[in-house]
Image: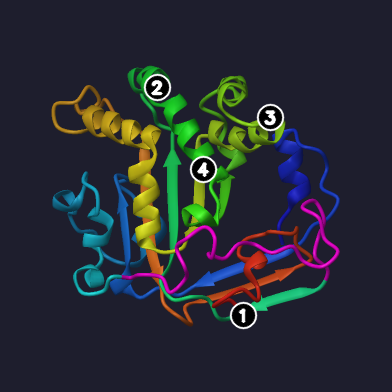
């Protein structure tokens, strides 16, 4: 059960009027998924197997695809249309508005082949003083803008759904006011500020559904802010970078990318807000 009342209280949002339940279960093949982290402790899919060095498959466009065993033989292209005019989009359920719940249960066991599910996680708990100062000087506004752009992207850009989550008991590594200042410059008002406040917590996760792996790669390459962020980050934490010295870096990052074939996704939504997860695609091409 999703405890939206507690979440809203902690984030300073209005009390939740309804609480629903949803689940999205994926069973990816090991040949079509990749996991990368700089954490010394197992996390996420890293708990499922032994560690291996992926330094030779890092830091360049397309490295996630090449980390997958099937990357060399499977194009992993979606059967969905790629154009904004014919691509799928979340539909409005009869009688529902964006701030209403959909009564009853929606259950989907069929989705288009090659949907791409991405998990990105960050833990700022152990940032060093030097690293924290560097983060706010060089990265924080770029990260906030990049996540804002992803959160605002829709199916026409290959983004089918996104969820921004945080472990609220982990504390904050930055005051909410900093995110609010960035949001006021770059986003669309109070709702955006509340959503981006998630980024101020020490430990957080972002979940994204993309049309396919290519859509994920494309939006990353085309977003100027992400390109700049990536360049700066690799320069700072890479060999010879300002954060590359022993004891300089305490940030923990991880990313998981899974390409799902037909029959590898199951979704259930009971009494959920309109547009929760992939629910809005029910009945669209490939979703049932």
Residue designated by label 4: 204
Q: Quadrant of residue 188?
A: top right
Name the quarter where the C terminus is drawn.
bottom right
Earlier in the chain: of badge 2 and badge 4, it is 2
Q: Which residues are magenta?
A: 76-103
Q: Main secondary structure of the magenta part?
A: loop
Residue designated by label 1: 288
Q: Are marks 3 and 2 in contact (CB under 8 Å)?
A: no
Report, in whole angstroms, how far the alpha carbon at label 2 lies from the one at label 1.
46 Å
* SS type, badge 3: loop
Residue found farthest to the front = 85
Q: Residue at x 44, y 26 (%)?
A: 140
Earlier in the chain: of badge 1 and badge 4, it is 4
Q: Are marks 4 and 3 in contact (CB under 8 Å)?
A: no
Q: Indicate left or right for 213 with 151 as reference.
A: left
Q: Indicate left or right for 48 with 171 as reference.
A: left
* SS type, badge 1: loop
Earlier in the chain: of badge 1 and badge 3, it is 3
Residue designated by label 3: 189
Q: Residue 192, position in %: x, y?
A: 64, 35
């Amino acid at each position: 059960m999703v405890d939206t009342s507690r979440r809203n209280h902690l984030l300073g949002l209005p009390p939740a009027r309804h609480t629903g339940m949803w689940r999205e279960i994926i069973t990816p093949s090991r040949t079509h998924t990749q996991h990368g982290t700089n954490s010394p402790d197992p996390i996420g899919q890293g708990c499922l197997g032994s560690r291996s060095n992926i330094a030779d498959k890092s830091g360049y466009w397309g490295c996630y695809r090449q980390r997958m065993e099937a990357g060399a033989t499977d194009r992993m292209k979606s059967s969905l249309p790629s154009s904004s005019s014919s691509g799928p989009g979340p539909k409005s359920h009869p009688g529902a508005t964006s701030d209403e719940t959909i009564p009853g249960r929606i259950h989907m066991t069929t989705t288009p082949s090659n949907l791409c599910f991405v998990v990105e996680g960050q833990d700022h708990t152990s940032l060093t003083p030097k690293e924290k100062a560097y983060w706010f000087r060089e990265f924080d506004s770029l990260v906030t803008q990049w996540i804002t752009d992803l959160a605002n992207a829709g199916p026409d850009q290959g983004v089918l759904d996104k969820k921004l989550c945080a472990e609220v008991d982990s504390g904050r590594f930055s005051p909410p006011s900093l995110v609010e200042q960035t949001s006021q410059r770059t986003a669309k008002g109070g709702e955006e500020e509340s959503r981006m406040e998630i980024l101020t917590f020490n430990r957080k996760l972002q979940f994204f559904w993309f049309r396919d792996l290519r859509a994920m790669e494309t939006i990353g390459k085309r977003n100027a802010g992400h390109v700049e962020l990536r360049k700066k980050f690799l320069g700072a934490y890479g060999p010879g970078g300002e954060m590359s010295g022993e004891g300089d870096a305490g940030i923990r990052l991880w990313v998981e990318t899974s390409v799902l074939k037909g029959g590898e996704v199951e979704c259930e939504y009971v009494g959920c807000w309109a547009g929760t997860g992939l629910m809005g695609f029910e009945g669209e091409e490939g979703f049932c």
